Image (tube, grey):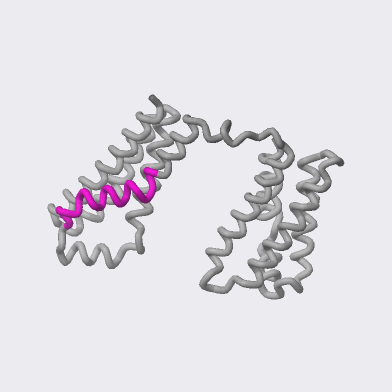
Amino acid sequence: MIFIPLILAHLLGDFLLQPNSWVADKERKKAGSVYLYLHILLHTVLAFVFLWNIELWWIAATIGFSHFLIDWAKLTFQNAKTKRTWFFVDQLLHVLVIAALSMLYFPYFIWEDFFNSESLKLITAVVFLTVPSSIFIKTLISIWTPVTVEHSKLQTESLVNAGKYIGILERLLVFVFILVDHWEGVGFMIAAKSVFRFSDLAEAKQRKLTEYVLIGTLLSFGIAVLTGILVKI
């Protein structure tokens, strides 16, 4: 399988072997930067080295050419507001190109073998533990939403949607801990969140707010634990 070696080559070329000075020069001069072409050459060479098969030269060349097109588009169309978005789009496109080339090299790849019942169950569980679970928990505890001055202050001082993303990350981590049979990791997660989250709530001195957050936290962990157990059955 050539997918993993090519991903490793990509990670080396895009992150470890690309100095910040190259990135700055490319963003300033765009297609006129000599470092853009050095960067493309580096990726082509790395792909060829990790493939280490002269018959697969066309894969290395395709990766180099596609990398140039993707990076050129990113440098041309990104701005200060869309820079973060373009970073993820850029990386996604590179991975998709590598995946497509890997599938061409292995024409006997069968989608049915990948999307079997076990993998579909795992994918469904991961998707469920993200936004769907957040909406479910938010809807379930909405009848107890405390409307207080302290609550409004905490909401104002916190990052936008931070609670939602923290919940998603904690559920995914709990899910992984259960799949690998490390239940102590779940206990560590609960303890860590208790220390950081409830120390802030103690300052608010609002019992209803504390109970509201506690219910949401227990629901979040409970859903992750139950999902992990069901997947392992």
Q: Residue at 53% of width from left, 69% of height from top?
A: 82
Q: Is residue 85 magenta?
A: no
| Camera-nearest residue between 117 and 77 | 117
Kindly identify the residue that appears in the image at 31 percent across and 46 percent down. Answer: 193
Q: Residue 90's quadrant in the figure?
A: bottom right
Task: Identify whether 116 is placed above or below 75.
Answer: above
Q: Image check: 8 left or right of 49?
A: left
Stretch in magenta: 128-145
Q: Horizontal and vertical percent for residue 173? A: 41, 40
Residue 30 in the image: x percent, y percent? 70, 72
Where in the figure is residue 69, as x and y percent of width and height? 71, 63
Numbered circles on residues, count? 0
Q: In this view, does 151 lie above or below 218?
A: below
Residue 7 shown left or right of residue 50 in the figure: left
Picture residue at 71% right of the left edge, 45% below the top: 101
Task: Considering the whole magenta stretch, tell me its main secondary structure.
Answer: helix
Q: In which quarter of the image is the N terminus?
A: top right
In the image: residue 16, left or right of residue 156: right
